[in-house]
Image (cartoon, rainbow, N blue to C red):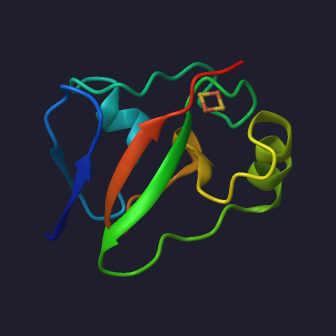
Amino acid sequence: MSTHRIEFPGTAFTPVELPDLASLPLHLTVLDSPVLFGCRSGLCGTCLIEVEAIAGDALEPPDAAERDALEIYAPGNPRARLACQLTLSTDVRIRKIESA
Ligand code: FES
């Protein structure tokens, strides 16, 4: 099974390796990471992050429901994603977006 690396630049958190197509809320909740989760259903914005693919393929784009939420929580930020809605398909750098 292939894995993908997640880096957390600008933090002291150690990069992690997760399986291809891993669910981030499932794994990052039990690992040491800066990403916090609330509803896990794309509504609350607690897991708002910026994501940059650093190797391999591009990430799947957000679906319509996630795009609607991102227009509320991070308008105009093309790298913003909800970690609870993201399926890991490549190596990424993740930065937590602090809510206003
Ligand atoms: S945990 Fe609530 S939107 Fe992701």
Instruction: Reply above or below: 88 against 30.
Output: below
Identify the residue shown where x is 32% and y is 32%.
28
Residue 80: x and y, percent? 62, 49
Residue at point 64%, 22% (across, down):
39
> Quick one: quadrant of the C terminus?
top right
Q: Is residue 26 left or right of residue 67?
A: left
Q: Nearer the viewer, residue 20 or 5?
A: 5
Quarter holding residue 56: bottom left
Ligand 1 positioned in quadrant:
top right
The N terminus lies in quadrant: bottom left
Q: Quick one: which residue is furthest to the bottom in this view?
A: 57
Left or right? Give the position of 52 relative to 61. Answer: left
Of the pair 48 and 44, the residue shown nearer to us: 48
Q: Is residue 29 above or below residue 65?
A: above
Question: Would you say 12 lies left or right of 53 here?
Answer: left
Residue at 18 percent of width and 25 percent of height: 12
Residue 45, x across and y down, in percent: 68, 28
Query: Which quadrant would residue 14 be assigned to in this image?
Result: top left
Seen as rendered, the residue at the extreme front is: 10
Q: Nearer the viewer, residue 27 or 16?
A: 16
Q: Give residue 67's position: percent from left, percent from top.
A: 79, 54
